[in-house]
Amino acid sequence: MLSKPWTNLLTIFLAWCLVWFNLPGGQAWAALPPQDEPTDPSAEATSEPSLDPATEAAIRKWARYFDRSVLNEEERIAELRWFAQAAAPFRGRRIRSVAEDIKTHYWERDVLTQAFQEITGIQVEHEVIGEGSVVERMVEQQRTGRILYDIYVNDADMVGTHLRSQGVVNLSAYMDGPGRPFTNPGLDLDDFLNLEFGQDYEGNQLQLPDQQFVNLYWFRYDWFTDPAIQEAFRAEYGYELGVPLNWAAYEDIAAFFTGREIDGQTVYGHLDYGKKSPSLGWRFTDAWLSIAGVGDVGLPNGEPVDEWGIRVEANIPVGASIQRGGAVNGPAAVYALTKYVEWLNRYAPPEAKSWRWVDAGPQAARGDIAQRIFQYVTWLSDDAFHQPGSPVVDEEGNPRWRVAPTPHGRYWDPGMKVGYQDAGSWTIPRNVRGQRRAMAWLWAQFAVSKTVSLEKFLVGGTPVRKSTVFADYVTEHRQRWGGLIEFYRSESRKEWTDTGPNVPDYPALSALWWPNIARAIDGEVTPQQAMDAIAQAMDDAMFAMRMARYSPRLAPARGASYWLAQPGAPKPPRPRPQPETIPYDELLARWVAPARPGEGE
């Protein structure tokens, strides 16, 4: 038995170790076991602790700041006071979070972290980095056990990876168990627009949406409704200029506008990006194949072949190549890549080949672009789309542009998803435990609370709540968003989904796309050769995967002719259809929601 002085020294040493390993900036992180720690952080929570005058003053200050909210001031004060009381055991502590570099997350970093700290006493270091880097760091944390961040805003596109690797916190279980004292009574999960994006096959919530943005068709409404331009298009193509419903019409419109002079400038009929970078792969995995018609009928993702072209049976991926019943190198996928390269070369500005997605995002606002088939609407929050004097804003400050449904390719069939929604979602790695997990969960809920959600949407244009898009303030100013509000209020929004749970290892598989697509852009390989290479690489990667659940198990290889003769995907070649367009105002009438949130859903 140790003498008392040695016992005291040992106690001090152990306490120092505990402090060191709980500090976010510590470097000596040890790999943690996969199971949850047995300690329950709720044991430290107190029942409605009294708040000091400084905290009460901060609550009232920020309740006034977030006056553009779906909650009235009294309700905002009550919600913010709950956060202060729930966080009482953690005052003076610090956590780290990370998100991709879009406007929404810069605002969280610059405004919300300050509000959260003043109200809860918890300091948040919210780092904003490139999306690819977010994924890389999450993978590193899960692989090494080192805690790089306590919580990530990670795309729900990775939910298939998370459910198979079991590497993130099951939020449903956490909310019902040790996280109950730290779960906001006003979280209101039913108010979220697309909660299912972050769920596993069993409906467990693995990720909570923090921001989301849809991909829609963008066009110059003022040009499309100009009588002289309409007459010129009708004379050349024999049908009416309008919102294209299919790629055949989009292609005609792109050809019509490219090289035409409007308002003293030469314009382009298409906008895209083509720089060799990871975002070049997102251009395809973010449902470009789906809107071309590569996969099968089914929502939120095609069954049994999804929009990545992966065949999945009983939640088990069995192949990507056409030889194994997949569609990555089938006729529809080759058509998708062919049109992408053709349009980029023929109808987009020459400099587009040197752009990444982040570079191309706001380019439509420069005034010489007629349409864009695949506009990530987060970029519509850029000031250039709204400020007076912009070529895409009229004298009264209203947009000269509109958004509409994504036109679909020749292989698309009714009942398939129409387009893509990106859902950046709060995700807690499994090795973040105890108090750190509780603080991370409080921060995530604060960032999506009803108190702040409307203001966050007004800044970044990335709504996650029904109450936000149905807010009275949004109704009064809905023309500012050029049809986006009507889209989110409609039932049509359910046809735009994210990648879904079928992709077994998003980081590993997505990395296979962009190098091969870049070779096709540069003319080094044909579209067929590029898609053959991607399909083979995906099959090889899935063959080597060993996942905790629903691990891939490749089907035997068969001839392509066998699969092309079967119903559904992969689909045999189809001819170019007749171009179809629709007047925008007629289209908008279809985007009429039957009820406010909670009614008729």
Image (tube, rainbow, N blue to C red):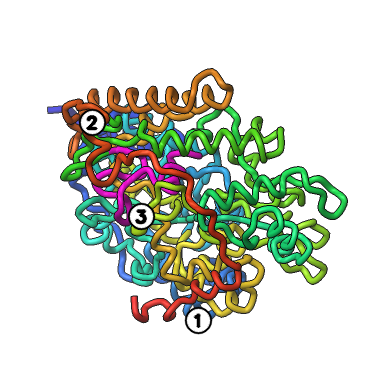
Residue ranking furthest to the top: 524
**Which numbered disc, 3 or 1, marks the residue that appears first in the sequence?**
1
Q: How many badges with numbers are in the image?
A: 3
Label disc, if present, on residue 324 of the rendered structure: 2
| For residue 74, side relative to residue 207 (left or right) | right
Residue at the disc numbered 3: 416
Could you say whether the residue bearing mark 1 is in a helix, strand or loop?
helix
Q: In this view, does 279 lie above or below 47?
A: above
Q: What residue type is labelled 1?
A: Glu
Could you say whether the residue bearing mark 2 is in a helix, strand or loop?
helix
Q: Can residue 96 be seen in this view?
A: no
Q: Which amino acid does label 3 sit on?
A: Met
The N terminus: image quadrant: top left
Residue 330 in picture, x, y percent from top left: 35, 34
Tell me which corner region of the image, top left, top right, bottom left or bottom right, holds residue 35. Answer: top left
Out of 386 and 128, give the one closest to the viewer: 386
Q: Is residue 75 above or below residue 148?
A: below
**Which numbered disc, 2 or 3, marks the residue that appears first in the sequence?**
2
- In this rendering, the label closer to the viewer, 3 or 1: 3
Residue at the disc numbered 1: 74
Mark 3 → mark 1, Cα distance in angstroms? 45 Å
Q: How crowded is mark 1: few (under 14 residues within 10 Å), some or many (20 or more)?
A: few
Q: Which residue is drawn at 63% across and 66% down?
A: 482
Q: Which amino acid does label 2 sit on?
A: Arg
Tell me which corner region of the image, top left, top right, bottom left or bottom right, holds residue 386. Answer: bottom right
Circle 1/circle 2 CB separation < 8 Å: no
| Magenta segment boundaries in residue numbering | 283-310
